[in-house]
Image (cartoon, rainbow, N blue to C red):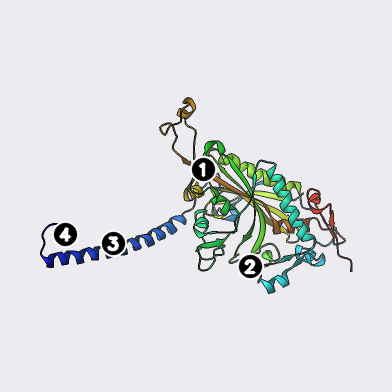
């Protein structure tokens, strides 16, 4: 375009420039779309697997520990649905009219029991050095995806909000994982230990059958979640710490349970290794999952951009801090574990502590959190 040009040639070059600009804009739009598709495909790749993880489906999971024994009843055992009806603790019918199936109202002592479980669990976990949090319960879809969940997949467990880039959380793991997104943490701050209360929302797509009746599988529930950010070399140690906390909590409540080392096909995308806790539920006549503890290594932190800067030898030996002395940042490891998923804990407590007269005893540790109440008895007419 510079220099003397014939007017017709100049006009031809101007048109060519316009076409190049329009073509470039179209290519940039295509690039954004392709990058999004590439990101979606990449996010389907799961984490690596710990060498000790059993290979195969859920049936290949191995028992790490068995605690306690199932109670012996000298009377016909009731399930939590029957107990809840007789003690006036739930209303599933009204909730179905108001909200749909797999919703519920808690009533009377069941409300006190939920609050007691939450407050007792929080107080016990805080004693172990965890910082309490309440979290947002609506988060950006991108954060959900970076934590390893697939809100756009078929049969997703995630509720997405129409005409927005937001979702309801299925677990506090998601907003707590995003708490330090796109940041470099100081080495001296690690480990960061959080215990978070939230409500959780799950579609429970594909769930059906008698084993999912009542409170066992619901769309909305309260949960206390533990979450740790730590140095990579410490994550296996903290994984053991998390499962120990879970076992201590459930032992304190007198539950009969087993801890499982979950097989590779049951890990989910983020987990490098996962321990599940299954407790005996007499009314269901089987063990049911009440908790899990996962080591996600750097799977989530890479996507969320959470790093820390290790203290280098140069920093230790030199009093002066300069860019040349700083160690390069590394990705932290993240771990999460369920301290208390309220509905399934209520199932366990009602079914294991039922009495012949139809009442239910309250475990000793929860009584101070229920105003001293020691038994849930039938209401007098």
SS for callout 2: loop
How far is disc 2 from disc 4 in space, using C-alphas?
71 Å
Residue 305 in the image, given as x and y percentages of width and height: 47, 48
**342 up-or-down from 208: above or below:** above
Q: Choose mark 1 or mark 4, whichever is in front.
A: 4
Residue 111 in the image, given as x and y percentages of width and height: 76, 60
- Residue 32 appears left or right of 24: right
Q: Choose mark 2 or mark 4, whichever is in front.
A: 4
Which residue position is annotated with label 1? 332
Q: Which mark is residue 1?
A: 4
Could you tell which of marks 3 and 1 lies nearer the N-terminus?
3
Q: Choose mark 2 or mark 1, whichever is in front.
A: 1
Which residue position is annotated with label 3? 24
Q: Mark 2: give few (<14), some (14-19) or many (20+) Cα within 10 Å.
A: few
SS for callout 1: loop
SS for callout 3: helix
How far is disc 2 from disc 1 in space, using C-alphas?
38 Å
How far is disc 3 from disc 1 in space, using C-alphas?
39 Å
Residue 57 in the image, given as x and y percentages of width and height: 56, 55
Which residue position is annotated with label 2? 208
Residue sticking out furthest to the bottom: 97
């Amino acid at each position: 375009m510079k220099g003397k040009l014939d007017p017709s040639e100049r006009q031809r070059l101007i048109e060519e420039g316009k076409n190049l600009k329009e073509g470039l804009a179209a290519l940039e739009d295509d690039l954004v779309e392709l990058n999004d598709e590439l990101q979606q495909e990449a996010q389907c790749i799961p984490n690596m697997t710990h060498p000790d993880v059993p290979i195969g489906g859920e049936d290949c999971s191995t028992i790490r520990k068995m605690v306690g024994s199932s109670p012996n009843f000298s009377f016909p055992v009731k399930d939590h649905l029957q107990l809840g009806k007789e003690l006036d603790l739930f209303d599933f019918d009204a909730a179905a009219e108001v909200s749909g199936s797999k919703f519920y109202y808690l009533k009377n002592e069941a409300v006190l029991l939920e609050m007691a479980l939450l407050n007792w669990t929080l107080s016990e976990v805080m004693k172990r050095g965890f910082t309490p949090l309440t979290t947002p319960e609506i988060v950006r879809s991108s954060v959900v995806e970076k934590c390893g969940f697939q809100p756009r997949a078929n049969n997703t467990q995630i509720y997405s909000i129409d005409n927005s880039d937001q979702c309801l959380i299925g677990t506090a793991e998601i907003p707590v994982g995003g708490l330090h997104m796109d940041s470099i943490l100081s080495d001296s701050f690690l480990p960061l230990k959080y215990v978070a209360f939230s409500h959780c929302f799950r579609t429970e797509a594909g769930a059906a059958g008698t084993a999912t009746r009542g409170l066992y599988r619901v769309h909305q529930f309260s949960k206390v979640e533990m979450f740790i950010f730590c140095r990579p070399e410490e994550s296996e140690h903290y994984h053991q710490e998390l499962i120990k906390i879970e076992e201590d909590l459930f032992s304190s409540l007198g539950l009969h349970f087993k801890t499982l080392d979950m097989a590779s096909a049951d890990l989910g995308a983020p987990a490098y290794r996962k321990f599940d806790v299954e407790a005996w539920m007499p009314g269901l006549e089987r063990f049911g999952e009440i908790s899990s503890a996962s080591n996600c290594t750097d799977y989530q932190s890479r996507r969320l951009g959470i790093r820390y800067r290790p203290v280098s030898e140069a920093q230790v030996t030199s009093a002066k801090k300069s860019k040349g002395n700083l160690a390069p940042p590394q990705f932290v490891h993240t771990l999460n574990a369920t301290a208390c998923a309220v509905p399934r804990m209520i199932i366990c407590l009602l079914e294991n502590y039922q009495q012949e007269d139809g009442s239910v005893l309250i475990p000793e540790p929860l009584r101070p959190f229920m105003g001293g109440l020691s038994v849930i008895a039938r209401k007098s007419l």
